[in-house]
Image (tube, rainbow, N blue to C red):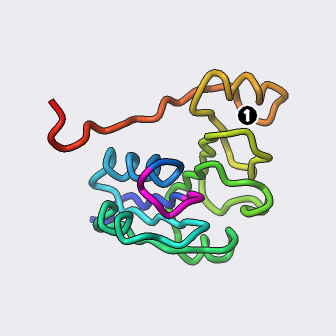
């Protein structure tokens, strides 16, 4: 049976810190899903190892045609600016998870990683909802 296919788009191809770490926590939280993760930077070896079976790719811009060919069931954007992500309608349901103040690329729903950030987007650019980032327990921690 085909698995649910999630496309995540993040800024930095490093699993240590930033949007790469957030994308990694999502892949860990949904182990039975098929994961594709696109980064707007090069992807280091540590990140490739951490993401294990996910399909990783480095991209310059987010293009609707490339997404249509991929055929994801859902798209999760991690702090993707309008400059990098364009503003054409995405070809699958989408959620934008904001990590900092940017001019965000449009998605079906936008949430923030903190109440502080949600308050700064109260002018209608975000839904005002806060979605706390899950942080896994590191191996060997008590």
Q: Quadrant of residue 137?
A: top left
Q: Residue at x 36, y 63 (%)?
A: 34
Main secondary structure of the magenta stretch: loop
Q: Residue at x 42, y 56 (%)?
A: 15
Task: Identify the residue position indicated by label 1 in the image.
Answer: 126
Depth order, front residue of 70/44: 44
Report the label total. Answer: 1
Position in image of residue 88 (x %, y %):
78, 62
Position in image of residue 52 (x %, y %):
28, 65
Q: Residue at x 46, y 35 (%)?
A: 133
Horizontal side of 46 relative to 22 (left or right) equals left
* Residue 78 belongs to magenta span: no
Point out the image quarter for the C terminus: top left
Q: Quadrant of residue 95?
A: top right
Magenta part of the protein: which range?
Answer: 9-16
Query: SS of the residue at dot 1?
Result: loop
Point out the image quarter for the N terminus: bottom left
Q: Residue at x 31, y 60 (%)?
A: 50
Q: Is residue 4 above or below residue 126?
A: below
Pointer 1 local density, CA inside 10 Å: few below 14, some 14–19, many at least 20: many
Horizontal side of 103 relative to 131 (left or right) equals right
Horizontal side of 3 relative to 124 (left or right) equals left
Q: Residue furthest right?
A: 123
Position in image of residue 81 (x %, y %):
74, 54
Position in image of residue 14 (x %, y %):
46, 60
Q: Is residue 121 above or below residue 9?
A: above
């Amino acid at each position: 049976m085909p698995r649910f296919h999630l496309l995540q788009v993040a800024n930095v191809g490093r699993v240590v810190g930033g949007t790469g770490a957030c994308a990694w926590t999502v892949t860990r939280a949904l182990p039975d899903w098929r994961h594709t993760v696109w980064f707007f930077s090069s992807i280091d070896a540590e990140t490739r190892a951490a993401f294990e079976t996910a399909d990783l790719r480095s991209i310059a811009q987010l293009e609707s045609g490339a997404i249509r060919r991929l055929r994801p069931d859902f798209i999760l954007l991690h702090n993707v600016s309008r400059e990098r992500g364009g503003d054409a309608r995405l070809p699958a349901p989408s959620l934008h998870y904001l990590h900092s103040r940017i001019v965000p690329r449009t998605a079906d729903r936008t949430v923030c990683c903190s109440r502080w950030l949600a308050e700064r987007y109260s002018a209608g650019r975000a839904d005002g909802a806060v979605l706390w980032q899950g942080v896994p327990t590191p191996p060997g921690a008590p």
